[in-house]
Image (cartoon, helix red, strand yellow):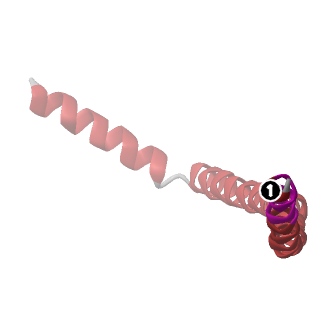
């Protein structure tokens, strides 16, 4: 039973696949799908590249510059903080000296 069905399907598929019109249709369909896929890939490549370039400018390059500025600002503030603390220590030392003199 299965042999008869397999034989019938094989004969019909051989007839269909050896038909030149069907073969041309299948080749044209495959060529169209390949071309459309290449076009879609190209568009997505361009859009994705532009998106990465945009996000790179907004989220990678600018924060790095800002971090350098913040690091410089924090370095300046740390360098001014010891001077301020030294002044505070000097004023504290001078302030207790006056009451103890009394």
Above or below, 4 against 61 in this view is above
Q: Is residue 19 part of the magenta span, yes or no?
A: no
Above or below, 3 against 83 in this view is above
Residue 72: x and y, percent?
A: 87, 75
Q: Nearer the viewer, residue 6 or 65?
A: 65
* Outermost residue to the front: 102
Q: Is residue 53 visible?
A: no
Q: Residue at x 88, y 68 (%)?
A: 87
Q: Nearer the viewer, residue 15 or 75?
A: 75
Q: Residue at x 20, y 28 (%)?
A: 5
- Say left or right for 98 vs 35: right
Q: Residue at x 60, y 52 (%)?
A: 26
Q: Residue at x 85, y 62 (%)?
A: 88
Rendered image quadrant of residue 55: bottom right
What segment carries the magenta color?
Answer: 91-99
Number of callouts: 1
Above or below, 8 against 94 in this view is above
Residue 74: x and y, percent?
A: 83, 67
């Amino acid at each position: 039973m299965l042999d008869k069905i397999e034989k019938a399907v094989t004969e019909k598929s051989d007839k269909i696949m050896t038909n030149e019109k069907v073969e041309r249709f299948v080749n044209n369909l495959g060529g169209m799908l390949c071309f459309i896929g290449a076009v879609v890939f190209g568009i997505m490549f361009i859009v994705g590249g532009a998106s990465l370039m945009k996000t790179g400018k907004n989220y990678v390059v600018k924060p790095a510059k800002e971090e350098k500025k913040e690091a410089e600002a924090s370095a300046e503030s740390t360098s001014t903080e010891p001077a301020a603390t030294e002044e505070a220590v000097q004023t504290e030392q001078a302030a207790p000296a006056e009451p103890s003199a009394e």
